[in-house]
Image (tube, helix red, strand yellow):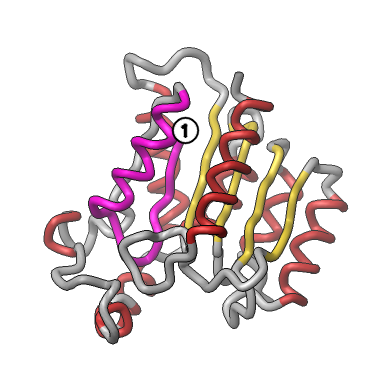
Amino acid sequence: MLLFMDAIGLRPELITMAQRIASWGYVVLTPNLFYRDGTAEELMPKGDLRQPGERESFFAGVGPRMGNLTTDKSTADTEVFHQTLLGLDAVVGDRVGTVGYCMGARLVTRYAGSHPDHVVAAAGFHGGGLVTDQPDSPHLSVATARAEFVYGHADNDGSMPPEAVQTLGAALDAAGLTATNEIYPDAPHGYSMADTSMYQEAGAERSFAELEALFARTLR
């Protein structure tokens, strides 16, 4: 399966999460989406994002990286990640699951739409910007997907308000897809990341439980 990182980037916490998923019996590829801006080690936070103000300070410099990762670039990158994953010696077959966090949820959605013959399970947690008024809005990609989807949205999230969740749900229904599209109560944006001040154990553990069940239904 392919894990798309959040905007904070590839770091020990993401590797811990990937290892947890791998312990369920899957091969997990977790790429550095910001490789154009530097190595994972160069870009990872130097401070403790659980401390007051540290997360906010770090995010002040993240905007340019996110802006540099255009849809065209991320689509081309995803194709390389996909081929790399299927080419790994430990991979058996060509059924793929994927999960993304924060901005990674957008890439998950597009990945499922662009590779319907391979991606059978797709999950996005505390995703932002999944619904926009642009022609490349991520939610439009579900029209060509065949995967089962699980979305766990943050509560009171300005980047994914209730009306956007409803629009995403309508798109999933129109595509005839099996999907869970829910807001996690009281869970802040970034709830799954234990190395930040936004971590919420209830939301994080729910996301892992739903992800494990999704993969068991589709990838086994």
Residue at the spot x=31%, y=62% of the render? 195
Q: Is residue 29 magenta?
A: no
Q: Position of residue 40 (x, y in %)?
A: 19, 55
Query: What's drawn in magenta, residue-wise?
Result: 1-24
Is 94 placed above or below 65 here?
above
In what quadrant of the picture does the C terminus appear?
A: top right
Pick out the residue farthest to the front. 202
Dividing the picture into quadrants, the one containing residue 79 is: top left
Q: Position of residue 216 (x, y in %)?
A: 62, 26
Number of numbered discs visible in the structure rendering: 1
Q: Position of residue 9 (x, y in %)?
A: 30, 60
The 10 Å Cα crowd at callout 1, few under 14, some 14 to 19, many 20 or more, is many
Is 17 placed above or below 214 here?
below
Residue at the spot x=33%, y=54% of the render? 33
User: Which residue was labeled with disc 1?
Assistant: 1
Residue at the spot x=59%, y=78% of the render? 157
Residue type (three-letter) at the residue carrying disc 1: Met
Q: Is residue 6 magenta?
A: yes
Residue at the spot x=40%, y=30% of the render? 22
Q: Is residue 162 visible?
A: yes
Report the front residue among 219 and 50: 50
- Secondary structure, mark 1, is loop
Direction from residue 40 to residue 147 in the image, left or right: right
Is 49 placed above or below 202 here?
below
Report the front residue among 46 and 130: 46
Q: Position of residue 59 (x, y in %)?
A: 31, 79
Direction from residue 181 to residue 21 in the image, left or right: left
Direction from residue 65 to residue 210 in the image, left or right: right
Report the front residue among 73 and 198: 198
Direction from residue 143 to residue 91 in the image, left or right: left
Q: Is residue 61 visible?
A: no
Is 184 placed above or below 122 here?
below
